[in-house]
Amino acid sequence: MHRKETLERGILSLSAALLTLFLGACAGGVPDTRGTFDGASPSPSLDAYNLELLTFIASEGGLSASEIPETEVLAYVSLAEVAAAVGQCVEDTESGIGVEDDGSFIFETSNPDELKQIWITIYRCNAQYPVSADDTQPYTDEQKEIVADYMLVEQVSCLEDLGYLMETPPARSTFVAMFGDDMGQGLSPWYPTLVDPPTESEDVERMQELCPANVPLDRLYGD
């Protein structure tokens, strides 16, 4: 998940790639609710990928064990379907959270209590529509190379073309060695850390649109 917030307008890019923070920092003015989650998932039968995803959401949202909503799995979905499924779920809650075509959730509040409810809603919907185990298998060697090409070449070049400076990317061999066996498809083991990340909603949205943070799934799976 990639989390981006501004005071006037919040943006939460929540998708199958919910495990890494793209910008590495949040804009000033919005309370940082992140905490250490010490509760158990309400769906212990889920695989490691989905359990880690839910734990990450709970931690990012500062949810305590008592605040975790009771849920049941309604359907297992593919990585290609998860953004739409979770997005529709969020919209159906009438929580006031907007959903964009890329799966980003838009909200217009910096109130801590309202932000907490947003995270609870996002947690519940991800728990109800977990990613199918068929899509959370370890990367093949070929897929690792595809992700490396995208992140170290295309992503870095795209961000540089937009004028952003970033910390030095890892060597290709180091990048490939960073993959974990429990890493879900579509994720990268490394994301650029920007020296001066954007803080305005419009700039964040433009960066997301022009330089998507994760390799397109059709490159990993084919058309």
Image: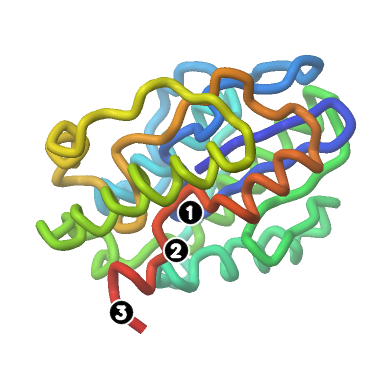
Mark 1 belongs to which amino acid? Answer: Ala
Q: Secondary structure at mark 1?
A: helix
Q: Quadrant of the C terminus?
A: bottom left
Q: Which residue is the site of mark 2?
A: 73
The part of the image, by quadrant, that contains residue 152 is top left
Q: If you read the primary sequence from the N terminus, does the residue marked by circle 2 or circle 1 appear first? A: 2
Determine the residue positioned at 42% across, 51% down. Answer: 154
Badge 1 crowding class, 10 Å Cα cut-off, few under 14, some 14 to 19, many 20 or more, is: many
Q: Which residue is the site of mark 1?
A: 127
Q: Which residue is the site of mark 3?
A: 222
Q: Secondary structure at mark 3?
A: loop
Q: If you read the primary sequence from the N terminus, does the residue marked by circle 3 or circle 2 appear first? A: 2
Q: Secondary structure at mark 2?
A: loop
The part of the image, by quadrant, that contains residue 34 is top right
User: From where the camera sits, is residue 66 visible?
Assistant: no
Q: Nearer the viewer, residue 188 or 145?
A: 145
| In this view, 144 is above or below 84 | above
Determine the residue positioned at 75% across, 63% down. Answer: 91
| Spot occupied by residue 220 in the image (x, y as percentages of width and height) | 29, 68
Mark 3 belongs to which amino acid? Answer: Gly
Q: Are marks 3 and 2 in contact (CB under 8 Å)?
A: no
Q: Are marks 1 and 3 in contact (CB under 8 Å)?
A: no
Q: Are marks 2 and 1 in contact (CB under 8 Å)?
A: yes
| Spot occupied by residue 139 in the image (x, y as percentages of width and height) | 17, 56
